[in-house]
């Protein structure tokens, strides 16, 4: 297990009781380096959406716990955020929530000279994702070929 995965798992175990008490959902935790700065980020959600005050309340509790536990030797910035509209589908509950909705799929390599696809999420399993395209045809993607899948957002 990588250093980042270890930090993410430990953070998840610390934040889950806080979120359960507040009736929030943990969408994701990531530990990443951007430029010369490390970031530990928790993405949270709730029915109706997360507010800045919700993020602040979670961050306040978590900062105290992170200081006490002190399991990350590097200097880092801790952030709590809403996952936003364009969040990737990562967990089973993300796929369940988006079944029947339009999704955007980006692939690592071109398929029929295209790397971006849109359609209604119809089915998924551990190996594949099936969408219905604009013509009503089922299109199946191997999970290994998918670089990104998220709910489609049109502006």
Image: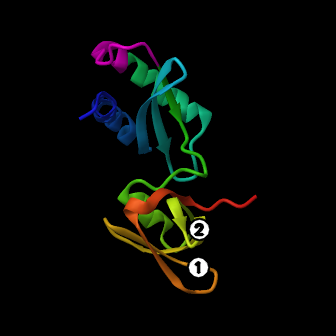
Q: Residue at x 61, y 51 (%)?
A: 85
For the residues labelled 1 and 2, say whether their Cβ atoms are less than 8 Å apart.
yes
Q: Depth check: give the residue in front, 128 or 88.
A: 128
Snapshot colouring: rainbow
The image quadrant that residue 96 belongs to is bottom left
Q: Is residue 52 above or below residue 131?
A: above
Closer to the chain start, of discs 1 and 2, is 2
Q: Position of residue 119 (x, y in %)?
A: 58, 73
Reply yes or no: does residue 15 show up in magenta.
no
Tag 2's secondary structure?
strand
* Label 2 sits on residue: 117
Residue at the spot 64% in from the left edge and 81% down from the top edge: 134
Q: Is residue 119 left or right of residue 96?
A: right
Mark 1 and mark 2: Cα distance apart in space: 8 Å
For image coordinates 52% across by 53% down, the residue present is 47
Region in magenta: 65-76
Horizontal and vertical percent position of residue 128: 37, 69
């Amino acid at each position: 297990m990588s250093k980042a995965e270890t930090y993410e798992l430990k953070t998840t175990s610390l934040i889950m009781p806080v979120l359960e008490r507040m009736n929030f959902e943990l969408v994701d935790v990531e530990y990443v380096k951007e430029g010369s700065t490390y970031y530990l980020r928790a993405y949270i959600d709730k029915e109706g959406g997360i507010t800045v005050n919700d993020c602040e309340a979670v961050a306040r509790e978590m900062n105290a716990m992170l200081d006490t536990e002190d399991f990350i030797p590097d200097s880092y910035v801790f952030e709590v955020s809403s996952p936003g509209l364009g969040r990737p589908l990562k967990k089973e509950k993300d796929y369940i929530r988006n079944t029947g909705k339009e999704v955007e799929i980006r692939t690592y390599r071109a398929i029929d000279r295209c790397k971006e696809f849109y359609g209604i999420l119809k089915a998924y399993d551990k190996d594949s994702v099936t969408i219905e395209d604009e013509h009503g045809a089922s299109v199946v993607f191997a999970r290994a070929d998918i670089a990104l899948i998220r709910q489609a957002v049109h502006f």
